[in-house]
């Protein structure tokens, strides 16, 4: 196979999976890892990809890239819907207590399901704590839900409150469950997101809840955004749509994180 053919294949793989590894490409193309690295270097010089440790990602997958909720809402919708359905198993009709819901598209789908939640005992309410305007508006449609909307500086791109005021309110709360989103989950770096202020809120949600549940679709496995907000051992549960690969699966097992595959 000529270099141009290999490089075209690499581009196709990146379009489908978003990430490639040197080891896998070397095996699939039956060439040395040095040859693969030369191919990746040439593609990086053309602006097609960005090299990372062990492989490469699409050029637009920067640790600082942060898209709006509208842009993200049309991506991986089936996977996110399954994750939201699986997460709702933790909120049966018999559930009594409080749940914190982070800002994001997958957590937004959880909010839609909470909007239809019905307690087994009439008159009992579910307390939902959130810093997301979208989540608050969604769950408030349910008369069985009591909403505690956190204040702070509103970030337009995520429609979520951040900053000292938000963190101060969270420091006085201890919800029974927190559903937390992330832009990446990595065996060594843990959970991460592009923005420092969003990361601070996610850290507070993770560490301040009795049960921290990360909702992360498989496309984010192995990814590292700029700011880490939680180590794997800060989590109690990961809900995802595909079984993690070996390095991440081993790290999750070592951290004693329950993995629910939707």
Image (cartoon, grey):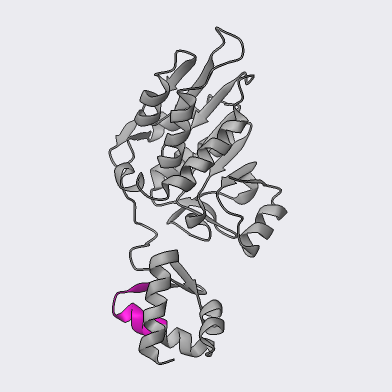
- Tell me: residue 199, above or below residue 19: above
Residue 226, how many percent across, how many down?
Answer: 42, 56
Q: How many marks?
A: 0
Instruction: Name the quarter where the N terminus is drawn.
Output: bottom left
Q: Residue furthest top?
A: 123
- Indicate whether residue 163 is drawn in magenta: no
Q: Furthest residue to the bottom? A: 2
Q: Is residue 217 left or right of residue 73?
A: right
Left or right: where 127 falls relative to 47: right
Instruction: Answer yes or no: is residue 3 visible.
Output: yes
Q: Residue at x 66, y 53 (%)?
A: 252
Q: Nearer the viewer, residue 203 or 144?
A: 144
The part of the image, by quadrant, that contains residue 59 is bottom left
**Where does the image place residue 183, in percent across and percent down from the top left?**
45, 51
Q: Position of residue 70 (x, y in %)?
A: 30, 43
Residue at horizontal 54 percent and vertical 36 percent from the top: 85
Which residue is at the front of the view, 62 or 198? 62
| Magenta segment includes 47 | yes
Picture layout, residue 43 above or below residue 240: below
For residue 209, above or below residue 118 = below
15 left or right, relative to 205: left
Residue beneath the point at 32% across and 74% down: 48
Relative to 21, is 194 above or below? above
> Which span is picked out in magenta?
40-49
* Residue sitting at x 65%, y 58%: 249
Q: Give the overall secondary structure of the magenta segment.
A: helix
Residue 135 percent coordinates (x, y): 40, 29
Q: Quadrant of the C terminus?
A: top right
- Depth check, front residue: 33 or 254: 33
């Amino acid at each position: 196979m000529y270099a141009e053919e290999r490089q075209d294949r690499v581009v196709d793989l990146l379009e489908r999976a978003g990430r490639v590894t040197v080891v896998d490409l070397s095996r699939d193309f039956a060439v040395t890892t040095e040859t693969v690295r030369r191919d990746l270097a040439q593609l990086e010089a053309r602006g097609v990809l960005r090299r990372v440790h062990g492989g490469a990602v699409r050029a637009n997958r920067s640790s600082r890239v942060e898209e709006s909720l509208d842009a993200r809402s049309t991506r991986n919708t089936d996977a996110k819907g399954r994750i939201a359905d699986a997460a709702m198993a933790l909120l049966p009709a018999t559930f009594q207590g409080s749940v914190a819901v982070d800002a994001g598209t997958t957590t937004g789908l959880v909010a839609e399901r909470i909007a239809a939640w019905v307690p087994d005992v009439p008159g009992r309410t579910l307390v939902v704590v959130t810093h997301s305007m979208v989540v608050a508006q969604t769950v408030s449609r349910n008369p069985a839900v009591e909403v505690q909307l956190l204040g702070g500086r509103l970030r337009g791109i995520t429609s979520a409150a951040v900053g000292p005021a938000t963190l101060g309110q969270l420091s006085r709360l201890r919800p029974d469950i927190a559903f937390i989103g992330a832009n990446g989950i990595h065996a060594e770096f843990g959970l991460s997101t592009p923005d420092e202020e969003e990361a601070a809120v996610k850290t507070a949600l993770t560490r301040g809840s009795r049960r921290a549940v990360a909702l992360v679709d498989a496309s984010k496995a192995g990814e590292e955004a700029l700011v880490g907000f939680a180590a794997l051992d800060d989590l109690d549960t990961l809900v995802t749509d595909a079984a993690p690969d070996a390095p991440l699966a081993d790290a999750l097992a070592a951290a004693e994180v329950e993995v629910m595959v939707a």
